[in-house]
Each structure stands twice: as C-alpha cells, then as structure tokens.
Amino acid sequence: MERTFAIIKPDAVGKRHAGAIIQRIEDAGFAIRAMRKAWLTKAQAEGFYAVHLGKPFFPSLTEFMSSGPVIVMALEADGAIKKWRDLMGATDPAKAAPGTLRKEFGSSIGENATHGSDAPDTAAFELGYFFAGVDLI
C-alpha cells in the first residue's frame, strides 16, 4: 500500500463540491487515513509551494490557496500516487479526460479543484507538512 497527499482546493470547497469529490475518492477505492479542513495563511501556502518559488505563477498560486478553506487528506491505496493523479486528471481542466475530477469540477489551470503529490518524496514532504505527528490510521 502506498500513501499520497491530496487537497480539495478553495474553488471546489467554495462551490460545495467537497462532498462529491470525497465520494469519488472513496468510490475509487482509496482509504482516507487522515482528513481535515484548513484555511491556509499566505505564509503556509508559500511554504507548501516553496518548490515553485520564483516561477511566474507562484504569487497567484499562493494567493489563491490562501483565499478560502481547503480540505487536506492522506490517501492510501495500491499505487496511490498514480491512481490519485489519474483520478484528478490533467492540470488544465480543458485538457483533462472526461470523468476526471478536474474536468468535472475545475474551471481553469489556476482553479482546478484538486492537488496531489507527484512522487514518493513529494508525498512524504506534503504529508509531513500537514499531518506532522498525526497517526495516519
């Protein structure tokens, strides 16, 4: 079993899509090992996305991610990282495959409903960032 990190972003939470997204996560066979609602400060968003510091989209990304509540989750499944990325779909909802979360719930490349770790080392960092000291049951 593998663990990955997921976020339901402010756009999807604000549009009241969180329940539908969580249902899709469970229907896809993921075990939700931890979940909580949070409202990131700008500093927390900047720390989380520090890997993108200096990129042109960094200011708008961190502003967006601190603009409203998010739901952060630790997901577990066989091949969880790839499985979650496949369920999310392409970063740009216009290019995402039908049936993916971003196609269904995202509205733009910036407001694309969900985030997910892209590799085991990223998942470890992201899980630790939001669930440090939490027993992922």
Image: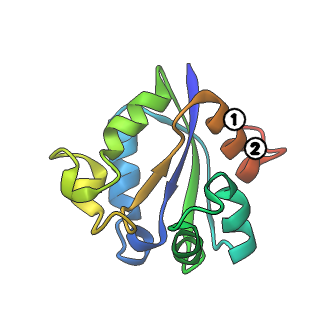
Residue at screen point 42% across, 37% down: 84
**In this orientation, which residue lies closer to the viewer: 36 or 62?**
62
Number of other residues with Cα within 10 Å of mark 2, as a class: few under 14, some 14 to 19, many 20 or more:
some
Relative height, residue 106 to residue 81 (above, below): below
Image coordinates of residue 34 in percent, x first then y, are: 63, 45
Q: Residue beneath label 2, please?
A: 128
Relative height, residue 87 to residue 60 (above, below): above
Relative height, residue 84 to residue 34 (above, below): above
Q: Is residue 32 left or right of residue 34?
A: left
Q: Is residue 132 left or right of residue 98?
A: right
Residue at screen point 60% across, 76% down: 66
- The quadrant of the image that shows the C terminus is top right
Q: How many marks?
A: 2
Residue at screen point 69% across, 76% down: 42
Residue at screen point 52% across, 67% down: 56
Q: Residue beneath label 1, please?
A: 124
Image coordinates of residue 72 in percent, x first then y, are: 58, 55
Q: Are marks 1 and 2 in contact (CB under 8 Å)?
A: yes
Q: Is residue 137 visible?
A: no
Relative height, residue 76 to residue 13 (above, below): above
Q: Residue furthest left?
A: 98
Q: Is residue 98 left or right of residue 90?
A: left
Q: Is residue 93 visible?
A: yes
**Residue type (three-letter) at the residue carrying disc 1:** Ala
**Element assignment for label 2:** helix
Q: Residue furthest right?
A: 133
Image coordinates of residue 123 in percent, x first then y, are: 62, 37
Q: Is residue 85 left or right of residue 49?
A: left
